[in-house]
Image (spheres, helix red, strand yellow):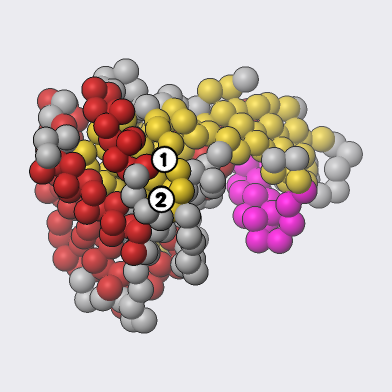
Amino acid sequence: MKATAKAHTNIALIKYWGKRDESIILPTNSSLSLTLDGFYTTTTVAFQEDLSKDSFILNDQSVEGEAYQRVTNFLDKIRNLSGKTNLYAEVSSINEVPTAAGFASSASGFAALASAGTRAIGVDLSDEELSRLTRQGSGSACRSIYGGFVEWEMGSRTDGKDSQAVQIKPETHWDVRVAAVVLSSTMKKISSRAGMKRTVETSPFYTGWLDSIPNDMKEIKSAIRDKDFEKLGTVAESNCLKMHATTLGANPPFTYWHDTTLRVMHTVQEMRANGIPAYFTIDAGPNVKVLYLPENEDRVKEKLQEIPGVDRVTLSKPGPGVTYL
Ligand code: DP6
């Protein structure tokens, strides 16, 4: 009763920002992402009759506390699906750089856990069913089941049966690259979970955000279909700015941006003014991801690395969906 799965992280081009149900994680808006090849989690789940509780080892270290609780709560969902509610598991995960590269590891982490866990216990799910299950661990993780360009359809049901990710185009469709720009200084972290909750509850700008999603979604899908990079980047950058604008209206107000974050944003806009097509997007933290095309890789990397306050720049290509090892 053992299985190993590998899942890659993803970067949202249309952001998921807000929940309509916190317990089974249903979003207030649909989102769209690109799965990345550079960063992934490999997880082995072994269910064993002789265990009296779950254990979780991450990068060879035993994990306790909140992170352990999230894993064991998620294993409960897998146990319930299988009917084997008294069977505990040893979970061991290796994260390939995600935190150091400024990515949240929860997307690849829960996608790998859901995939390995269901396979180990013998529950056979379709990709859409697996995505719906994964969503309940961490919202953005439901997109990491698939490679390439992926949409998380928000759905409208209260039981979540129509809220899952689907692949729009595979990773082979279009070689859009992503540079992860990691800043050297950190700041007090408001998790994406807490940040989106505060924004939904208090920001007067939140309805404006929601109103703008259908058009952004339509535009970005046509950009992906037509491989129109300028359009893709323009929509992604503006969607990111709208998401971050909602946080300034929250009570208490907050921003994820750091002075270096702004410096990177300006550099990207300057690159465009100088004829290098590049666009930024930012998640719930100060680091920046820059979209570019392969022919501009060297110039983009060089420009980003020169910015004072940037610690390192890591490059990624479109990546695949979940695989089993
Ligand atoms: C800004 O998926 O980390 O990265 O569902 O509470 O686990 P939970 O949140 P999470 O939020 C990701 C928010 C984001 C945008 C995105 O990835 O779509």
Q: Is residue 210 left or right of residue 247?
A: left
Specify the segment rendered in magenta.
Answer: 62-82
Q: Nearer the viewer, residue 312 or 48?
A: 312
Quarter of the image where the C terminus is located: top right
Residue 270, label in figure: none
Quarter of the image where the N terminus is located: top right
Counting from the top left corner in percent of width and height, residue 306 is at: 34, 45
Element type at mark 2: strand
Local crowd at mark 2 within 10 Å, few (<14), some, or many (≥20)? many
Q: Look at label 1 and name its amino acid.
A: Val
Residue labelled with disc 2: 310
- Classified by dominant secondary structure, the portion drawn in magenta counts as helix
Q: Nearer the viewer, residue 172 or 78?
A: 172
Q: Look at label 2 and name its amino acid.
A: Val
Say whether residue 320 is visible.
Answer: yes
Give the residue at x 26% y 46%: 280
Residue labelled with disc 1: 313
Q: Is residue 34 left or right of residue 120?
A: left
- Looking at the image, how many numbered discs can be counted on the residues? 2
Res 192 quadrant in image: bottom left
Counting from the top left corner in percent of width and height, residue 73 is at: 64, 53
Element type at mark 1: strand
Residue found at the very far right of the displayed protein:
50
Local crowd at mark 1 within 10 Å, few (<14), some, or many (≥20)? many
Please tell me whether residue 214 belongs to the stretch shown in magenta.
Answer: no
Give the residue at x 16% y 47%: 270
Q: Is residue 68 left or right of residue 22?
A: right
Could you tell me if the residues under marks 2 and 1 are in contact, i.e. CB atoms within 8 Å? yes
